[in-house]
Image (cartoon, rainbow, N blue to C red):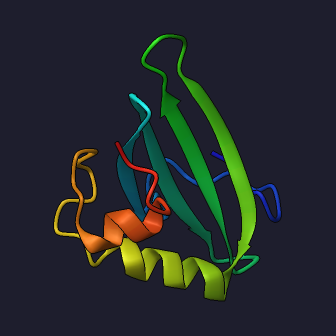
Amino acid sequence: MQCSGCGRDFPAEGGEGPVTSISGGIQGDECIETWFFCDRCRQYSVEVYWDVFLGDPECSVRGPVPKEEGDARIGLIRQCPQPWDKKCRCPAHVEYFNGSLD
């Protein structure tokens, strides 16, 4: 994974891995967003993985996301006790996915 701001590689080891992630079911697909923070450019990158129900999975990177915006999104994710559960319908999941969950 590379930083979408400065292009550097996030190390696979050493504590600079993903900050957090969240999963949601949308129209039969599973969307997993994993957030990375770059200490160098002070911005976030988001790896978006779509596990498509009737098709091949897709992976893309979104960003750079300004620190303030990313901090708010991560704060929202951390309000959920089970962010990995694509079937969770807690207020944080619903808000994060803009009410578009299955």
100 to the left or right of 37: left
Residue 17 to residue 96: above or below: above
**Along the viewing direction, whichever of 76 and 70 lies nearer the viewer:** 76
Describe residue 53's horizontal placement relative to residue 90 as left or right.
Answer: right
Q: Quadrant of the N terminus?
A: top right
> Does 79 sit above or below residue 14?
below
The reply, left or right, for residue 36 in relation to residue 42 is left
Instruction: Please identify the residue farthest to the top as the structure is shown.
Output: 55
Residue 29 in picture, x, y percent from top left: 43, 29
Q: Quadrant of the C terminus?
A: top left
Residue at 72% over, 76% down: 40
Whether residue 98 is visible to the viewer of this picture, yes or no, is: yes
Q: Which residue is outermost to the left?
A: 81
Residue at figure coordinates x 44%, y 33% from the top left: 27
| Residue that extends furthest to the bottom in the rendered view of this protein | 68
* Residue name at image x 36 percent, y 48 percent: 23
- Closer to the camera, 9 or 55? 55
> In percent of the image, x 57 and y 44: which residue is there?
48
Q: Position of residue 3 (x, y in %)?
A: 71, 58
Looking at the picture, tell me which residue is in the foreground, 85 or 46. Answer: 85
